[in-house]
């Protein structure tokens, strides 16, 4: 989502004359669009500002803007703690960035703006064009979260759930496709909680997928990130009815233990999660999954952890993100007693080894088969291209004349944990 926001921030400032530069030292304005999910996010931002300060020690000070979720969480505090920062703007108010910049120059006054103004944000963004045309393009369709998992900062930094108007999203998708996008990735903190009602009807994510599926020049559709609780029947059905919806779903579970899921306030059980996986596999036998895991959540016992390992074996995730629990300021889990550090590390290693072995085995299954790859980039100065297969796995392949934005057949010759390697072919061999 930050990539989408960064592009949109650029689209906005370009309307008042700013241009991108590859030479940081030549910049007269630096925007740090920050994320608050990772550990020590706030300190990393101050460290980066410290580095910028040093770089500009002997030259004119640039305008320094901090946007994103760290800006939201720290707010006014940032201006007090680091005088090199000039403007702090939250993720729901960055559409006002031009006014903030112009005001700053008019009045030479530092500004902090961290209101939740989501409706106006998307109305404003609708009126400006997209300057970044990518084969695979993001569209934010929903923001914020009402789920309040006990470990998560999102409900506090992105605010309550908000869904953009249905037509606004379809129009944005059509614009991106006309600009050359072949894949649209719908984004939201709880993307499958998408829920927009106008005078005529209530629109859910399934309605968006069905409408996008009809856009002629669009080849692929994906969405992320989903909550298991919002995997409704109509959405599951899309995996058989929407031919452009890719057979891959990132569905975070966090833990395989019901006790831990309850302590996390995840609002679903292990059994419910597995029932969703089963339904999806029944409706589309090609579908693969990835997930997120938190290891060492307060009160996690060896038995709880083993339930997570067991669930990983049952589902066979092809890709996952796993971290040791780290408390985030302002969340209920912050108050909890932490588990033993070494034990947490051991558990994380064990989980990551298991996930990695499964991933290697899954990738090996592609070897000597063909797969359809959406070509995203040429790798500089080589006859090599980068793309992704239907399951989002990166593919690097040799070709003399592959076209960026096309879907091509690649024979996979080898693989490692993260990537498939092969050559472009003209004739299809056995499909993976
Ligand atoms: S559902 Fe996701 S975004 Fe919402 S609180 Fe839980 S982890 Fe955070």
Image (cartoon, grey):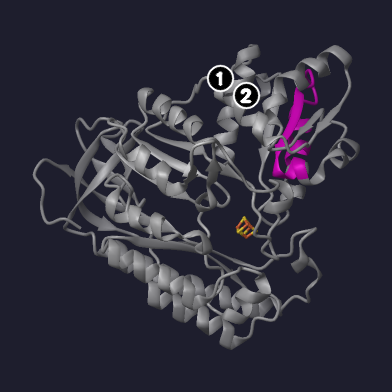
Relative horizontal placement of residue 84, taking residue 328 as reference (left or right): right
Nearer-the-camera pick, 113 or 21:
113
- The answer to whether marks 1 and 2 mark residues whose Cβ atoms lie closer than 8 Å is yes
Q: Which mark is drawn over residue 124?
A: 2
The residue to which callout 1 is attached is 128
Relative horizontal placement of residue 272, taking residue 42 as reference (left or right): left
- Quadrant assignment for the C terminus: bottom left
Residue 180 spot, x, y in % from top left: 35, 26
In the rendered view, would you say 420 is above or below 97?
below
Q: Which mark is drawn over residue 136?
A: none
Residue 362 spot, x, y in % from top left: 31, 65
Nearer-the-camera pick, 94 or 384:
94
Q: Does the image show residue 328?
A: yes
Give the residue at x 70% y 53%.
155
Circle 2 sits in a helix, a strand or a loop, which is it? helix
Q: Which residues are magenta?
A: 48-72
For label 2, the crowd category at 10 Å Cα-Cα, with few meaning under 14, some 14 to 19 and many 20 or more, is few
- Quadrant assignment for the N terminus: top right
Extreme bottom residue here? 303
- In the figure, residue 105 lies in which quadrant? top right
Extreme right residue here? 80
Give the residue at x 26% y 44%.
373
Extreme front residue here? 200
Residue 40 spot, x, y in % from top left: 73, 54
Circle 1 sits in a helix, a strand or a loop, which is it? loop
């Amino acid at each position: 989502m930050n990539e989408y926001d960064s592009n949109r921030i650029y689209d906005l400032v370009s309307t008042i004359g700013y241009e991108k530069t590859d030479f940081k030292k030549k910049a007269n304005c630096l925007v740090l669009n920050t994320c608050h999910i990772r550990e020590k996010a706030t300190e990393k931002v101050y460290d980066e500002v410290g580095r910028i300060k040093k770089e500009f020690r002997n030259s004119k000070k640039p305008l320094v803007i901090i946007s994103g979720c760290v800006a939201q969480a720290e707010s006014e505090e940032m201006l007090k703690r680091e005088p090199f920062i000039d403007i702090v703007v939250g993720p729901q108010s960055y559409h006002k960035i031009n006014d903030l910049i112009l005001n700053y120059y008019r009045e030479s006054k530092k500004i902090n703006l961290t209101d939740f103004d989501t409706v106006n944000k998307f109305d404003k963004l609708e009126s400006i064009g997209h300057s970044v045309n990518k084969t695979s393009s993001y569209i934010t369709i929903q923001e914020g979260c009402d789920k309040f998992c006990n470990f998560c900062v999102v409900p506090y930094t992105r605010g309550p759930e908000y869904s953009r108007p249905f037509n606004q999203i379809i129009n944005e998708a059509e614009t991106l496709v006309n600009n050359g996008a072949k894949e649209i990735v719908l984004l939201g903190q709880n993307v499958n909680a998408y829920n927009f009602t106008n005078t005529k009807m209530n629109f859910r994510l399934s309605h968006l997928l069905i409408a996008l599926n009809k856009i002629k020049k669009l080849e692929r559709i994906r969405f992320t990130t989903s909550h298991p609780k919002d995997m409704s029947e109509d959405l599951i059905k899309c995996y058989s009815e929407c031919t452009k919806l890719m057979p891959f779903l990132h569905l975070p579970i966090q833990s395989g233990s019901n006790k831990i899921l309850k302590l996390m306030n995840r609002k679903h059980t292990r059994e419910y999660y597995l029932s969703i996986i089963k339904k999806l596999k029944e409706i589309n036998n090609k579908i693969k999954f990835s997930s997120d895991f938190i290891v060492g959540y307060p009160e996690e016992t060896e038995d709880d952890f083993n339930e997570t390992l067991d669930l990983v074996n049952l589902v066979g995730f092809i890709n996952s993100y796993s971290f040791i629990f780290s408390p985030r300021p302002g969340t209920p889990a912050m108050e909890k007693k932490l588990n033993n550090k070494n034990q947490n590390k051991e558990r994380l290693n064990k989980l990551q080894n298991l996930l990695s072995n499964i991933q290697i085995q899954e990738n090996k299954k592609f070897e000597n088969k063909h797969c359809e790859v959406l070509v995203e980039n040429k790798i500089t100065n080589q006859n090599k291209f980068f793309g992704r297969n239907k399951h989002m796995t990166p593919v690097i392949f040799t070709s003399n004349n592959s076209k960026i934005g096309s879907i091509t057949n690649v024979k996979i010759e080898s693989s490692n944990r993260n990537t498939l390697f092969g050559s472009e072919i003209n004739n299809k061999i056995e499909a993976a």
